[in-house]
Image (cartoon, grey):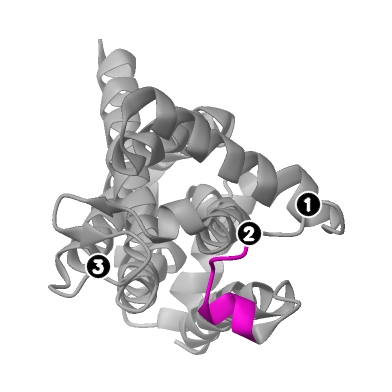
Amino acid sequence: MQKKRTSFLLVLVLLIVLVSSLFCCGCDLNRDSAKFKNPQVPLDVKNASLWDKFFVIPLSFLLDWFKNLLGSYGYSILVVTFFVRLALLPFTLKQQKNFKVMQKYQPQIAKIREKYKSDPQKMQLETMKFFKENNINPMAGCLPLLIQFPILIAIYQAIVYNPHIYRSSFLYLELGKPDPYLILPIFAGVTTYLQSLVSGAADNPQGRTFLFVMPITIFLLAIQFPSALSLYWVYGNIITIFQYALFLRTDDA
């Protein structure tokens, strides 16, 4: 029981650190606080940091380019999200492989848990021992979610520093402002939960922590961040869910 509690706390601390970095990075790269509140002045390309030059500015350029091609930043975000998820595909495949391994060994894991159900600490020790003997990483299913956070930071800054996106609208949304009806934040949380579910995160105690903590975290972020960021997250989750469905069907065929 103590180890389960420790695992939960470690995951929770990690999420707090990641969320804090999202807030702090958005503030630290703001050389001028007024500029952050009034994004009419774009990022200074000449004096940009390496992070800005290689991540934020290229993403902002892509969003502008696809908007000019498709006529809407809503569609532009969808296309850019697709390419981002394509870049993350190797990690998604690794996560899928881990999911299949967990499925394969699930009967043995269930037996261990049944055998030591009266001794949670012993059950945890034996389960982790089994994982180690079979080269199973129970946290591998959470890797793509963790990798997405730096990308999320870059997307956030590309939106905030781009006055064209910030002033644009899509459907009922003002992309530079939070969703007033909380529809996107709810979708962001629900699709994050579904993505974690289909990835096999529920097959181990650590993953189950992510299964519930991540959707809440994303929802809390989405209710205060620009709608464009929530749109990116919802698009990304839906694309990833379809990827899992495709690979699951392919593997089962």
Residue 36, numbered circle: none
Q: Which segment did they paint magenta?
A: 34-41
Pick the front one: 177 or 234 = 177
Tell me: residue 108, above or below residue 182: above
Taking the spot 49% from the left edge, 39% from the top edge, the residue there is 63
Q: For marks 3 and 1, give the one nearer the viewer.
A: 1
Q: How packed is label 2: few (under 14 Cα within 10 Å), some, or many (20 or more)?
A: some
Tell me: residue 244, above or below residue 34: above
Q: Are marks 2 and 3 in contact (CB under 8 Å)?
A: no
Q: Which residue is mark 3?
A: 185
Residue that protrudes farthest toward the top in the picture: 253
Position of 143 compared to 237: left or right? Answer: right
Q: Earlier in the sequence, mark 2 or mark 3?
A: 2
Tell me: residue 201, above or below residue 72: below
Q: Earlier in the sequence, mark 3 or mark 1?
A: 1
Q: Which residue is mark 1?
A: 45
Q: Tell me how far mark 3 sits from mark 1, CA to CA.
A: 32 Å
Dot 3 amino acid type: Pro
User: Element at badge 3?
Assistant: helix
Residue 42, numbered circle: 2
Decide if residue 107 is in sight here: no
Q: Are marks 2 and 1 in contact (CB under 8 Å)?
A: yes
